[in-house]
Image (spheres, helix red, strand yellow):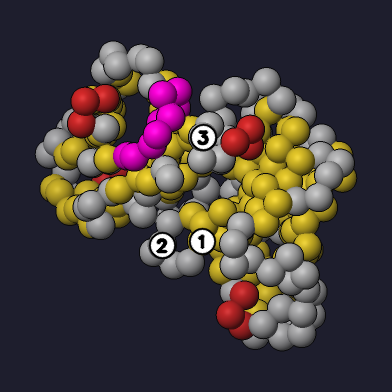
Amino acid sequence: GAVVSQHPSRVICKSGTSVKIECRSLDFQATTMFWYRQFPKKSLMLMATSNEGSKATYEQGVEKDKFLINHASLTLSTLTVTSAHPEDSSFYICSARPRDRGSGEQFFGPGTRLTVL
Amino acid sequence: AQKVTQAQTEISVVEKEDVTLDCVYETRDTTYYLFWYKQPPSGELVFLIRRNSFDEQNEISGRYSWNFQKSTSSFNFTITASQVVDSAVYFCALSDFISSGSARQLTFGSGTQLTVLP
């Protein structure tokens, strides 16, 4: 149980285009989903926290107009990288927290590797 | 503010050696949770363990063991008789309430790259 999927796993796009990444909790309802970014050989950096049905809370320094997050349902959150540029190339990981997890435990998706040419 | 420190950036050991990965944390909260995750080259994070702040019992799971010392704010991870498949980046993480409110965000350490040589 507690499986999180992410799609696509890998995407290559041209500079200036927008890319959407989907994060789904497959066998549980996630009231909260998180989006992380990871640079090579670096730790996970939290970008934003999203709660179902409300606006995402972005971490300091993360451009909300560039990284659009929509948590449309209890099993789906999307991250759209708008007008992508090469510096947006990174590994993006989502996670989901089940409704009843007071411990803060999160279940992670397999990640999406974005390359912007 | 909460903080997790993994001072060891990279560790190399030879297969069958034991290895300990260090994790030191800071939090003002009295109720918090600590986690270890493994990230193999594929990138997917693999959950290893969760420990709450009220449970200081050490835990053993096969070749893995964890030593939680509240007095020193440490949550170290030991792999006994390491194997090549253990090669990965290992992250320690902290979830508390004060810093992140109801969201209970995870704060990750910088990770330790473990390489097990055959």
The question of residue A35 being in magenta is answered with: no
**Residue type at tag 1:** Gln
Same chain for marks 1 and 3?
no
> Is B22 above or below relative to A39?
above
Give coordinates of residue A59: x percent, y percent.
61, 57
Of the pair A114 and B100, the residue shown nearer to us:
B100
Residue bearing the label numbered 2 = A42
> Is B7 above or below relative to B61?
below
- Residues at circles 1 and 2 in contact by the CB criterion of under 8 Å: yes
Residue bearing the label numbered 1 = A38
**Residue type at tag 2:** Lys
Of the pair A109 and A52, the residue shown nearer to us:
A52
Residue B88 visible somewhere in the drawing: no
Q: Residues within 10 Å of mark 3 (few under 14, many from 20)?
A: some
What are the residue bounds of the magenta stretch? B25-34
> Is B111 above or below relative to B24?
below
Same chain for marks 2 and 3?
no
**Residue type at tag 3:** Ile
